[in-house]
Every structure is written in C-alpha cells, then in structure tokens.
Image: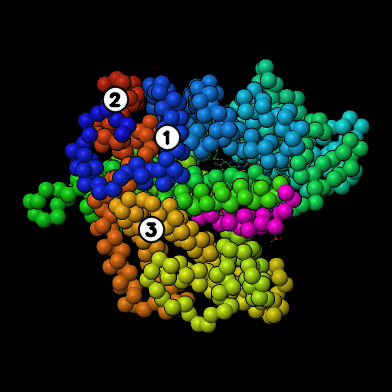
Amino acid sequence: MTSKNKINEDLANERRKCNFNIEEVTYILDGGKEKTLQRKKIEDVALNGGASVDDIPEEYLSARERYENAIRKSCIYTNIVKNEVLEITGIENYGSPVLRRTGDAFFKDISPFMLHLGMFVPSIIGQCTAEQQATWLPRALDMKIIGAYAQTELGHGTFIRGLETTATYDPETEEFVLHSPTITSYKWWAGGLGRTANHCTVVAQLYTQGKCHGTHLFIVQIRDLETHMPLPGVKVGEIGPRMGFNTADNGFLGFNNYRIPRMNMMMKNAQVLKDGTYVKAARHGKLTYGTMVFVRVTLVGEASFNLAKAVTIAVRYSAVRRQSELRPGSIEPQILDYPTQQHKLFICIATAHAFQLTASWLWNTFTAVQAEMKKGNVDTLPELHALSSCLKALSTSDATAYIEQCRFACGGHGYMLSSNLPFLYAFVVATRTYEGDYTVLLLQTARFLVKAWEQAESGKVVTPTVAYLNRHFTTNGKMIWDNSPEGIIRVFQSVAAGKISLCVRSIRNRITSGMDHEDAWLMTTVQLVNAAEAHCRSVILHTYWNEIVRLTKHSSDNVKTVLNQLVMLYLTYWALERTGDLLRYSTISENDIDLLQRQYEELLVKIRPNAVGLVDAFDIRDEILQSTLGSYDGRVYERLMEEVQKNPLNKEPVDPSFHKYLKPLMKSKI
Ligand SMILES: CCCCCCCC/C=C\CCCCCCCCCCCCC/C=C/C(=O)SCCNC(=O)CCNC(=O)[C@H](O)C(C)(C)COP(=O)(O)OP(=O)(O)OC[C@H]1O[C@@H](n2cnc3c(N)ncnc32)[C@H](O)[C@@H]1OP(=O)(O)O
Ligand SMILES: Cc1cc2nc3c(=O)[nH]c(=O)nc-3n(C[C@H](O)[C@H](O)[C@H](O)COP(=O)(O)OP(=O)(O)OC[C@H]3O[C@@H](n4cnc5c(N)ncnc54)[C@H](O)[C@@H]3O)c2cc1C
C-alpha cells in the first residue's frame, strides 16, 4: 500500500473480494522474493524525500523551464542513486531496471540522462577493450562525463550502412578526422545530445589507408567540460518539439574536420593500428550493432512495465468510476462490471505478464549468448538477433496499442495529462520506431526464418525457437485443433510454419518466373512481415505458458488458479483474434470457435473479482504512477480537483487577455 489516505469504498471492496495472495504474484513477476525486497528497499531510499513533487506540474512549463527542471531532478536522482542507493545495493546495481523505473517518480516524460545510462555506458561496456573501459567507464559511471548515442542521421536511421559521417585515419598525427560531408550526414535524434551531453558515441564510416571499412563506433568529446561550449569543429543543438521525449533534448550534431585521438575508436571488435592498418576481429560482421541488440532486449521489459502502469491506472479507475444503469432505477454499476470494459483491460494485465516473463527469458538468452561469445562462439548470435528483433517489435507495438486502449477505457478523464496515460502513450509509441522500426525488425527476423525453413527442409535439426519447422516436414495436412494450452500453442506454431512456407513458395515462384532474388524478396515482404509476426506470437504464447507452469509449481492454489486463468485468457484471446489463420492452418471448426468465445467470456467473469488484486500485484507506487486516476487509494475526483488548483490559468479570476482582446471584441460594432 502506498497511500495514507482513506481508501475509496469501491476499491476497498474490490480488495476484500480478491482471493489470492497478492505478494506471491508480485514475487513471481519480480523474479523472486529477494528481488522484490531489493526493489522495495531501493524505492524506499530513492523516494523517501518525495523529490518528485513539482510545485507546478511539468506540463505547464515552457520548453526551457521543462528542460531545466528535468536536469535539476536528474541531478537530484543521480545523487540519491550515487550516495544512498548504490551504497546499500552495490555498484553492480547501477544499470538495474529497478533504478530506471524508480526514476519514473521524478519524470513524467523522460530524463535527459536516459541515453547516457541506456546507451552511452552500454556502448563503452560492449564495444571497448578492457584498457579503453578502464579509461572511460569510471568517469561515465560517476557522471564526470555525460554521453549520448549518435548513430541516426538526418538522411538515414534504418540503413546503418548508408550513414555518411566519415572518420578518416591520419597516421601522421594518429588521429581520426570526423566530418559531416552533407546536410543528410548530420546526426539527428540522439537523446541527451542537444543540450546535456559533453561526450557521445558516434557511428561513422571508417576510412584508413584509402579504404572504407564500414561503420564503426567512436567516443567523441563535443563540449568543453568547464564551459560546456561546443568544441571548435562541432555544431550541436536541439532538434525541436516532439510528440513525447520533450525533456530528453534529442539533438543534432555535425563535424567540420574534427580530430579525435586514435584510441577513441571503440576497439573491441576491430582496430586501427598506429600505422593505419585495419585489423578485424574475425568473429561476426555485425558485432558493432551490439548496443542495439542490448537495448532491444531491455525494451521488452520496458513494454511490460509501461503497460503494467497503464492498466493499473485503468483498472483502479474502472473500479471507482460508476456510469449508466443496467436496469431502470438500479444503482449505477462500476464500469469494471461491463464485460466490454473487462475485454479491454484484462488482456492488458495478461499481456504485461506475458511480456515480463518473456523479457526475463530473453534476458537469460542474451546473457547466455554473451557468455558463448566471450569464448569465441558466435553461432547463437543470429538466433538472438532474430528473437530480440521480433520481440522488440511486437512487444512495443502491442504495448502501444494496449496503453491507448487503457486510455480509451478511462473515457474523458483518460485524456487529461494528469492521468499520465497520454505521457505513457507518447513515450511508448516511440519505442515502436526507435532502436529499429517495427517493419524493419520483423523483416530481419524473416531472413532468419526463411533460412531456418530451408535447413528444416533439407532435414537438418534447427534451433529450439524454430523447432516447430522440423515438425512441419514430418506431419501431413492441417494441425488437429486441440483446445488445451499446448494444443493452441502447437496450432500457432503451425500457422507460423505455414506462413513461412508460403513466403518461401512465393519467393521461389517469382524467381522461377524470372525475377531476381532481391525483387522476389521485396515483392514478398508483406507476407514475410506477417510470417515473422506469427512466429513471434507463437514464441510469446509458448514462453508465457511454459514460464507460468514452471513458476507456479510451488504456488498456493489460488495463485496458481488466477495466473492460469490469465494465461488461458491470453491464449484464447489470440486464438479468437486469429480465427482466419486457424481456419486455414488447423482443423478448427465453427463449433470450436463458438466454444472458444464462450470460454473467453467465462474467463472474464472468473478474473473480474481479482482484477484490482492483479494490478495491485504489479506493486507500482503512486509516486511512480503519477496519475490522478490510478492511485492506490482511488481518490480520483479529489485528485482531479487538486490538480485544478495547480493550474496557473486559475491563479487570477480574470485573465489579462479579457481586457486586451475579448472586451474590445465584445464592444466593437459589426
Ligand atoms: C552513478 C549515477 C547513477 C545515475 C542514476 C540513474 C539510474 C538509472 C539506472 C539505470 C538505467 C538503465 C537504463 C535502461 C534503459 C532502458 C531503456 C532504454 C531506452 C533507450 C532509449 C533509446 C532511444 C533510441 C535510440 C536509438 O534509436 S539508437 C539507433 C537505433 N537504430 C537502429 O536500430 C537502426 C535499425 N537498423 C539496423 O539495425 C540495421 O541497419 C539493419 C536493419 C539490421 C540492417 O543492417 P544491414 O547492415 O544492412 O544488414 P543486412 O544486410 O540487412 O543484414 C546482414 C546480416 O546481418 C545480420 N544482422 C543485422 N543486424 C544484426 C545484429 N544486430 N546482430 C547480429 N546480426 C545482425 C542480419 O541478420 C543479416 O544476416 P544474414 O545475412 O545471415 O541474413
Ligand atoms: C524518440 C526517439 C528517440 C531516438 N533516439 C535516438 C538516439 O538516441 N540515437 C540515435 O542514433 N537514434 C535515435 N532515434 C532514431 C531512431 O533510431 C530512428 O528513427 C529509427 O531507427 C527509424 O529510422 P528512420 O527514422 O530512418 O526511419 P525510416 O527508415 O526512414 O523509416 C520510415 C518508413 O520506411 C520504412 N522502411 C525503411 N526501410 C525499410 C526497408 N528496408 N524495408 C521496408 N520498409 C522500410 C519503415 O518501416 C517506416 O515505415 C530516435 C528516434 C526517436 C523517434
């Protein structure tokens, strides 16, 4: 519980109805009791001072005030983390998602330090040699230098090979010369770059001994550490107002023959020797893309967390809000009692669980692949790239859609910035684009799937996440429909296999009829995106189900029941969403679909009494939710009224514009 206020009676009733142990579910979602306790300890220390409270809500501030306020709060939070939190938890918790999430109590939008912590520091860890790390990492961790990640340019974001910034090695001075040869080569978008960062990771085309070796990463100082003035040869600034991310000072950056020392090239995967000789670590061509893979992996958890916030707000509000009447003269029902409202919201709870458990599983896969790569084995990297690409794409896309659904579920009040739902939406919708656009990433996964299909076709055993392709070649006809969780998952895997198979057939047919491979691929990309989406859906369904079975083995009966109801809701929801595919690739009948629909509606009824308990189990503190509609105590109307008092427009009874404009207009004659 995070509020000392009297609890709204409807919410209190909901909590009395809840029949499972909420803490047990929190432990499962956090990854164990120890982790929950650690998280709570961090939150207690970091939020003790109530530093999040702004006298004037940040949405009323001008662009400059907002930025300054965000820097002020970032410094407060950084000091708390440095001096208090890490003292208790140890430096190894520096990059923990708990710290990132606790930070949300300080910002409705985003901290200008986010990219320093989310990409600059990870790029040093992932792309620098041990010697380089010793130079840069302590300073970056201690915030002695503040960095950004400047990869995207005005002209290119997706196509990294098309970036135009050049880094040309000069053996005479043992320096790289950074240059922006065109307008389109200007770096564009990097968070924290515009006003905050004094350093950044720059991705540039490396030239040495007259030859281009493709994109590489460099650490570049862009501002003086004392005066914060841009250094000579550097042009830097803020790109302007955006849909969200308005406190992240996304920036532009150009170089005019700007020199940096040779050792500022991040040299873990390739080196330029003093004489200019290029030496490539011959392991995998795409290791310089590693920071993006890391962030894609973390974004699945981000999608879950932000959706959990949105649905916590929407479910609590729906328990407090009463509207309409079911029968003439009867008491107005809580809107949560409408099955259509449950249909909007319970899938959001289930999806947040699905993504959280998938995120943990993906993180474990990521660390296992990292460990293999340390030993020199890069064989598992393509599968990780395919998985992280499609899971990033789908989780951010679904989270975006469901956060908007949560906002719709809150009616007019959901449109208020003070509900926090518009901020959440604006923040999460960007995740569908950045770190790899949705379509582009699914097409990366599709490349992997087509290759896996060809391997399975030739009788080779393929990796576990596509093992269903081996089954595809040993079974004849449509998959037998079976309403069990395992049965539904098998059918979804058959849908994926069928769609990949169709893609392969289309590509081959097009090639047979005279197209070259590139055009045949291009013409098939609509289907390929669809196939990759189906594959990813099957991975999420499979992982969610497996993890729930594994994690609830020793749970109490009621926890087992409610978590099973949620995972069944998820499976049934997606089966109903995809009836066209199921009819095409399985033996499902119309009668089976009717049964599924009934099963889905019965699940809504079963989950209803535990809905508030389920969102309480996300255990997101009021300070982090920052919502007038979603607080633990349910004082929705009181909070909306309190917010009105903070509105600067209400400071004076008559606005000066009345005398300046309105009155003259009213007095003027037609
Ligand atoms: C003490 C102080 C304390 C402070 C306290 C504060 C507390 C805070 C605490 C903690 C903080 C923690 C922070 C956590 C943060 C979590 C949130 C993070 C938010 C971050 C916000 C990010 C904002 C946005 C950033 C960005 O967007 S950066 C730019 C990203 N850009 C992209 O993603 C570009 C997308 N494009 C591509 O990835 C590629 O160009 C491509 C589309 C993949 C194509 O590349 P190309 O080279 O052309 O390859 P292809 O020819 O298509 O393929 C060739 C081949 O390569 C394979 N491939 C491709 N990519 C990869 C890869 N990455 N890995 C492996 N393999 C790859 C591909 O599959 C092909 O293989 P085959 O030939 O075999 O098929
Ligand atoms: C809020 C925000 C923060 C960001 N922060 C950073 C940052 O810190 N550092 C940084 O370097 N960058 C950052 N970016 C940039 C981001 O990484 C790029 O915007 C993103 O990778 C998409 O690239 P693009 O803008 O070039 O889109 P484009 O590639 O131009 O995409 C436009 C459209 O074309 C389609 N398309 C493009 N290529 C293909 C293809 N091959 N096949 C099919 N369709 C295609 C896309 O699907 C999309 O529909 C940020 C962006 C945003 C919005």
Give me the C-alpha separation between circle 2 and circle 3.
43 Å
Q: Residue drawn 70% across and 49% down?
A: 373
Q: Residues within 10 Å of mark 1 (few under 14, many from 20)?
A: few
Give me the C-alpha separation between circle 2 and circle 1.
37 Å
Horizontal placement of 465 versus 140: left or right? left
Q: Residue drawn 35% across and 57% down?
A: 564
Amino acid on which disc 2 is placed = Gln
The quadrant of the rendering that contains the N terminus is top left
Reply yes or no: does residue 515 show up in magenta: no
Q: Residues within 10 Å of mark 2 (few under 14, many from 20)?
A: few
The quadrant of the rendering that contains the C terminus is top left
Horizontal placement of 333 versus 168: left or right? left
Amino acid on which disc 1 is placed = Leu
Reply yes or no: does residue 383 show up in magenta: yes
Q: Which of marks 1 and 3 is nearer the N terminus?
A: 1
Q: Name the residue under label 1.
A: 37
Please, which residue is most extreme toward the front here? 554
State the predominant SS element of the stretch in magenta: helix
Q: Name the residue under label 3.
A: 567
The mark closer to the camera, 1 or 3, is 1
Q: Is residue 638 visible?
A: yes
Q: Is residue 440 visible?
A: no
Could you tell me which secondary element the residue under label 3 belongs to?
helix
The mark closer to the camera, 2 or 3, is 3
Give me the C-alpha separation between circle 1 and circle 3.
26 Å
Q: Residue drawn 55% across and 67% down?
A: 531
Q: Name the residue under label 2.
A: 645
Residue 79 image point, x, y percent: 53, 21
Task: Determine if the C-beta at disc 3 is less than 8 A from ligand 1.
Answer: no
Residue 495 image point, x, y percent: 50, 71
